[in-house]
Image (cartoon, rainbow, N blue to C red):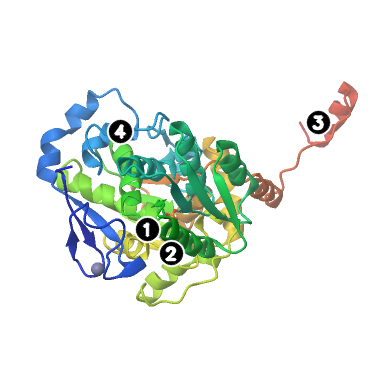
Amino acid sequence: MDHVKHLKCLICGKEYAPDEVAYVCPDHGNDGILDVRYDYKLIGARISRESLAANPDTTVWRYKPLLPVYPDAPVPPLTIGGTPLYKAERLAAELGLKYVWVKDDGRLPTASFKDRASVLAVVKAREKGAAMITTASTGNAAAALSGICASVKQPNVIFVPEKAPAAKIAQLLVFGSTVMLVKGTYDDAFELCLQAAAAYGWYNRNTAYNPYMTEGKKTAVYEICEQLHWHAPDAIFVSVGDGCIIGGLHKGLKDLLALGWIEHMPRIYGVQAAGSAFMYEAWRDGEDVLTKAPVSGVTVADSISAGLPRDRIKAMAAVTETGGAYICVSDDEILASIPALARATGVFGEPAGAAAHTGLVKAVDLGLVSPEDRIVILNTGNGLKDVAGAMKSVEMVGTKANRVEPDLADLQRVMAELGR
Ligand SMILES: *Cc1c(COP(=O)(O)O)cnc(C)c1O
Ligand SMILES: [Zn+2]
């Protein structure tokens, strides 16, 4: 792995050789998140935009020379990556914009963006010969780890809040994970998982603790830029919970700039739910994310519920270093975006996925984007992950199913009532 130079502590800047530390900076505990630093000269000699164009592999492994893994590392068989980037012309027109695309990561094997990170955890764990992998999760990171572990018969223990949506818990059970429903919040599950990993010696996938999760998540922007023929967008909208996805997008874009594959850094917009708006508040008030007190973290968008975002240093840099913004939206606005996004594009997102759309709507209102901007919104999770949320959303916009007797006359009565 000569292309990985070192792991750098985001707090003290100390650099560690990749095999010198397992997860965080020993001097800074759980806040001492490490960033993987690369030798771009070496990478540039091994992979190019031209070599990619000739590579038939559509998975994230097409970018293997840019990932912190050995060239011959065995990878799980599930098809992770290569999700569609749809040009959303009607959605753009509704908002007075010209160029909007939707990247649909609800299409990944376990139906959320988290597959991109969890697959890297599984590869790294197997590199170390780990007997057990563990993670805490609001649901999707767990489902992703669970499914990918199943694909390679890797034992794993999962910690999720007991109130996680049923579909996500069902995934864990179907894939055969050992499931711990924690009587508490995601933050409680996270702390318990860290303690368990230390006590049992399990490989730890936890977001913003394991430095490699950012590296998996960055593959989404590689795909976006490649799908746009290396003409980077002007703005990217993504919802933010722990802040690992937004940090990953920023990292990927920095990689592409360093390689000279794109010419400018897009503005990154982080969308947060009003009840879980730690990053938004810190950004708005110029607060230090390391000393700011946790918020309650209550939102209908369970995947972005995080009282204390674990990846808050990277999450703040992603916005401030790119000239983006944090945007705060209400739960009702998020719910309204589920049918709005679905009806304009055919993409059905879970609440946290649709929240990216809500953020764009608000950004238009706030004058943060111009009609000429080339904009990507990221759907991070499939709508079927949270049917209760989806049903609430259609109820809110007044969409109801019709009850009809099984005969044509009654159907005609109903159609007449509907004015059809
Ligand atoms: C995890 C998740 C997010 C937020 O990602 P963070 O890294 O926690 O900010 C957004 N949407 C979905 C569907 C997710 O599963
Ligand atoms: Zn440190």
Residue beneath disc 1: 208
Q: Position of residue 419 (x, y in %)?
A: 78, 34
Q: Which mark is residue 61?
A: 4
Q: CA distance from mark 3 to mark 1?
A: 53 Å
**Mark closer to the chain start, 3 or 1:** 1
Q: Residues within 10 Å of mark 2 (few under 14, many from 20)?
A: many
Q: Which residue does the numbered mark 2 point to in the structure image? A: 309
Kindly identify the amino acid type of the residue bearing the numbered disc 4. Answer: Trp
Residue pictured at 53% horizontal, 37% vertical: 347
The local crowd at label 4, few if under 14, some if 14 to 19, many if 20 or more residues have their Cα within 10 Å, is some
Please tell me which residue lies in front, 124 or 282: 124
Q: Earlier in the sequence, mark 3 or mark 2?
A: 2
Q: Is residue 324 visible?
A: yes
Residue 415 is tagged as: 3
Which one is in front in this view, the residue at disc 4 or the one at disc 3? 4
The answer to whether residue 391 is left or right of residue 216 is right
Task: Find the distance from the CA under tag 3 to the CA under tag 2.
Answer: 50 Å
Disc 3 marks which amino acid? Answer: Met
Is the C-beta of the residue carrying label 1 under 8 Å from the nearest atom of ligand 1?
yes
Front: mark 1 or 2: 1
